[in-house]
Image (cartoon, helix red, strand yellow):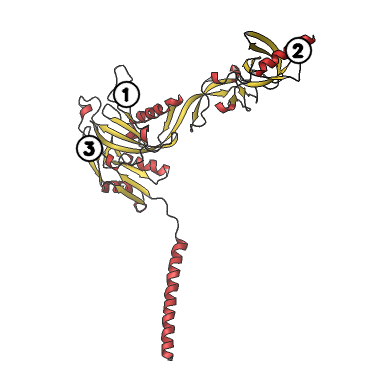
Amino acid sequence: MRKDCDNHQSSFAARVACLVWLANTFFAAQFSFAEPREAKRTIRLWPTAVVASDPIRLGELCELSGFNAADERTLSQISVAEAPVSGGTRVVHLDLVRSVMSSAGMNMASIVIAGATQCEVSRPLSASSPSSDTAGLNSPGDQRSGRSSTDVGNSATVLRHAKTPPGATDLAKLSLRDAISRFFDAELTRFQATAEVTFDRTPSGVLDLCGPTFEFHIKRKSATPLGLVSIEAEVSTGGRVVQVVPMQIQVAMIRKVATARRAINQGAMIASADVELSTLTFHRTDDIGVDDLSELVGQRAKQMMTAGAVIEADMVEIAPVVTRGQLITLASESGGVRVVTAAKSTQEGKRGDTIRVRSDDDKHVEFDAVITGPGEGRLIGESTNNAQRTADAARSKK
């Protein structure tokens, strides 16, 4: 082979090797120095919004996500513009939102702004206005077409404040905050409990909207009964939805439950002086205790209970009415003749239990008996005849 050809091939191979090295170096640098991306901080502008007072605040116009709690509270309170006059509307453009946030010192390069390009803000007429219940808010229509498909079946409840029955509580004056609390109160009725709702990140301007101008439709978006719960609140007026507000709120349950008034030893019989009802807050539904003291008094503790402890159903058991070694009265019937005798129980038992009992006259003879009450039992089956024969034999020896 010619020498110049060798040089040519060698030069080509060197160039290929160099390109491969550069490519590997580039990709290695990309993966070695890339840092995990933080969650995007997003402001999603709603197409419509409703305000009750002046000024318009950022939290009333959009949904904030990806921010820490402190930044979110600060952002939601930023004043964007003057609110429209009562019964009027005004449009807030996205450029104005950007400008206001930039003036507030926010780094716009790190924030994603999404959603609508403008928000039509409505302000209802005051409740004292004669036409407040039919005020025309220039809403662009129902926003429900963009709703998530994660609705939870039958848990949705509609609270219509305009339809208040005569003599009932004046629901027409309830705010959205009150409507949400009543929604969860209704859910917790089955536990004989009331709800404690905490609105950490929801703008107060939205929560303070109230009837009779507005009606509220509260719908669950998650199945979790307590703790962090996602909901969606529709705000309607004149039969039209003017705003849909997604929320994440903290829900706890307040109910009266049985607690130990003093320490109760394992195996002890529970007396009325040992227990009391206490009002407590729960964050789960699987540890809510017993709410009826009559279910505990007269029962036996299966474990040690300290003073103040919540008593749950599986911590007690039905107390035995017959103890082991106890002398009990046994009744038996055969051929219309009722015979009553005494015997000693070989085990403890509750009312209705079948236990073995030993003849009081002959400790080697045992029978089956059903416990009928404290210290009482009834012989069953063949035991009746055997007991009768044993009693007869004992009397004949005497």
Residue 161 lies in quadrant: top left
Q: Earlier in the sequence, mark 2 or mark 1?
A: 1
Q: Are marks 2 and 1 in contact (CB under 8 Å)?
A: no
In percent of the image, x 54 and y 18: which residue is there?
A: 294
Q: Earlier in the sequence, mark 1 or mark 3?
A: 3
119 displayed left or right of 20: left
Pair 3/2: label in front: 2
Q: Are marks 1 and 3 in contact (CB under 8 Å)?
A: no
In percent of the image, x 26 and y 28: which residue is there?
A: 213
Tell me the CA gap for discs 2 and 1: 82 Å
Q: Residues within 10 Å of mark 3 (few under 14, many from 20)?
A: many
Q: Are marks 3 and 2 in contact (CB under 8 Å)?
A: no
Which secondary structure lies at badge 1?
helix
Question: Residue 144 at what x, y percent from top left?
Answer: 28, 39
Location of mark 1 (residue): 171
Question: Residue 47 at what x, y percent from top left?
Answer: 26, 42
Residue 195 appears in the picture as rendered: yes
Tell me the CA gap for discs 1 and 3: 24 Å
Location of mark 3 (residue): 139
Location of mark 2 (residue): 393
Q: Residues within 10 Å of mark 2 (few under 14, many from 20)?
A: few
